[in-house]
Image (spheres, rainbow, N blue to C red):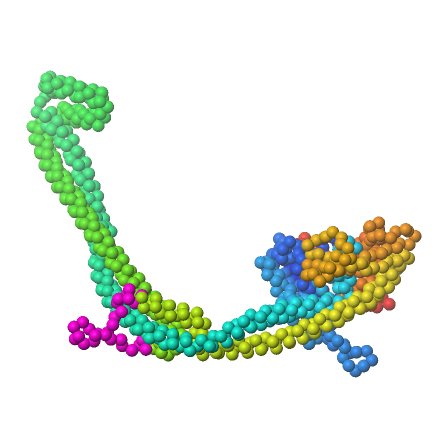
Amino acid sequence: MYLKSIELTGFKSFGKKTDIVFASRISSIVGPNGSGKSNVAEAFRFVLGEQSMKSLRSKRGEDLIWGGSPTLPRSNRAGVKVVFDNSLPAAQGTAQAGTRLLDLDFNEVAVERIVYRDGENEYLLNGTKVRLKDVIRLLAGANIGGSGYQIISQGEADRILNASPRERREMVEDALGLKLYQHKKAESERKLEETASNIDKTKSLRREITPHLNFLRSQVQKIEKAREMKEMLAAKLSEYLAREHAWITSEDKRLSAEERSQETELKTLGNRANEARGKRPSQSAGVLQELKGKIIEREQKLSEARRESEKLTRELGRAEGVAEANTVMVEQIVAVPHVRQFAREVSEAISEALRNDDMPSVRVLLLHIKDRIQSFVDGLSGSAPDTKEESQQQVKAIANSLERVQKEETALAQELEALRAQITQVRDAGFAAERDLIELESAVREAQGKLGSVQNARMTIATLRQAFEDEVREGIALVGAAIHDWEKPLRQPADGGAGDEVLTGDDRPAQEKRRREIERLKIKIEESGIGNGDAVVREFNQTRERDEFLGRELVDLERSAASLKDIIVELEKTIDAKFTEGLKLINATLGDFFMKLFGGGAAKLEVEEPRLRRGSGGQSPKSDEDLMDEEEEMTEEEELYAGLSISVHLPRKKVHGLEVLSGGERALTSIALIFSMSQVNPPPFLVLDETDAALDEANSKRYADMIRELGSKSQLIVITHNRSTMAAAGELYGVTMGNDGVSKMLSVKLEEAEKVAK
């Protein structure tokens, strides 16, 4: 047995880590619907590299991860690991060792695949990260795959009957183990196409090189003339570069000094602006806040003084009334004419105030009446000389207090006026400082603009210096070391003959004229096609050597193409031979299985006539002559392909086609075909997911007998509800699911139980 175990962690309904150890040739997985049995088959597909989410009953990778339940939180990843026994068995009857299942030098190989919630997949071989391609190639060498006939899931047993002839042939080729040969053939064809393309490219390159070689030969003859032009170019270029260098150096020096001057001015203006910012209203906010606090304090005191003044005024009125009352008798008070006059005046004043809705005046008049009444009562209570004197003293004291409070009120009002004037002064000073700051900031911006202009000018000079250096390098490439003459000081007689002065190159129009003359010389040299004579000779030699190399390469490519064609022919012969022989074996086994399942009859796979298949879809039929004319124009999009059809003859029925079979008959036919395919080139293991679901009791027993027969050649993992199928297994795994929604495994070793029973 090659398949040792499979481990599921967070995969679909297996929220907890679950290990299934396969110790028997036939292992049966049973359980009620919805418990997660089919998730085991899909776990095999998943770990063996299946990429179709539809085949895994999912829409995206996240659907494969345990989604959580009230008792078990969701997982962040799902992983499946399958372990193979890869030990080296001893060969029968010899002392030599056999062949390992997988082409790895390990006695045990663990293939693991992990999917994360972001859809990222990870593949591991014995704990080491690998590519999906590495896993598929390794398993393909052992006739193991995740999406082939090896794993037949629930409802897919009928797939081979519904498949097109071409798809059916591909399934048979897969079962016969021809994928490896077809892969080698496809790889050889790809290499042949690349080789043919390289041959065409090589021939094209040689065709391109030939006229260039002739051109280079003609160029060599022009080298002498080009040397004269190069000498002239060296002289003109040296003068031009010397003047340009002098001007760039002088201009950069001038701009550098101007930049320093502008930076100094900007710094000075910046310092002045900073000082002005210290005098801004925002800086005197504390002073204003303090003054406002004092004003509030003085206003509160002034309000208190005014209230005190009003209080004293009322007290003075009452005291004066008392004093006046003490000077007359009651009868005199009643008879005094001015009392009646006072009453009439007060009544008229109150009526006038009410008409004008002047309630404050009404309140004042009422208070006045109250005071006069109180004074009258006080006068009635005693009019003795002592009382009169005492009343006069009280009036005097209250009058003094009122005078003091009024003076205090006047002082507070003056102080408030002074504080408000001070606030106005502080604000005016702040506004003046703000104007000064705005002017300074404007000056700073102007200075920054000037500095930016100077810096831009320096950047322009830097660009010109870079262009100058490029011209120097270009000149070196054109005329060689002679270009360095520009570094020598270039002098001319000064006006008046009073000595020599260094040329500054400040005459830009004349300098531009020199540059145009140099460019014209460069163009002539370039048009001559030789440039540097040594370079032309060197290029000629290199081109000739490249042409000779391409000639040798062409011979090697043609030899390689012939070898690849031979390999393809041999592979095609091998594929055809193995397919023909394998198809015979499949048909022989198919006939036996068919007779066992149906109690007679026959079934056979037949090769159809080759058809022209186009990648773009169906085309109208064409004659043999048309097909012959198009054979040379075949591309990857069209080829001749012979598919497989199925011929079925049921016992005791005149049935010869798949379309008239019943559901049970189709199920038996597909089972017979799948089992026969698996026997020709038996895979290490088969996973059958309820392929017996449509069988009745009698056919279930036949199916179980076939399972036992298959178990002698391949390890079987059978997911079933059928008791007959369960009885054929050596061990049972029961899948259950509790209220937490997590699938759990229980195992029963039937073979051990049978031994104990015996």
Q: Residue at x 73, y 61 (%)?
A: 631
- Region rendered in magenta: 485-512
**Horizontal side of residue 481 vs 99, given as left or right:** left
Specify whether residue 680 is in view. Answer: no
The residue nearer to you, when weighing 291 against 78, is: 78
Image quadrant of residue 734?
bottom right
Specify whether residue 197 is in view. Answer: yes
Q: Residue at x 33, y 75 (%)?
A: 235
| 496 inside magenta stretch | yes
Q: Position of residue 741 (x, y in %)?
A: 67, 54
| 198 inside magenta stretch | no
Q: Position of residue 169 (x, y in %)?
A: 77, 60
Q: Position of residue 40 (x, y in %)?
A: 71, 60
For the N terminus, give its image quadrant.
bottom right
The residue nearer to you, when weighing 55 against 304, is: 55
The residue nearer to you, when weighing 425 against 57, is: 57
Q: Position of residue 432 (x, y in %)?
A: 18, 49
Looking at the picture, does residue 428 appear above or below residue 143? above
Image quadrant of residue 750?
bottom right
**Horizontal side of residue 751 vs 190, given as left or right:** right
For the C terminus, give its image quadrant.
bottom right
Residue at the farthest bottom position: 95
**Horizontal side of residue 652 vs 533, given as left or right:** right
Q: Residue at x 56, y 73 (%)?
A: 210
Q: Residue at x 41, y 75 (%)?
A: 226
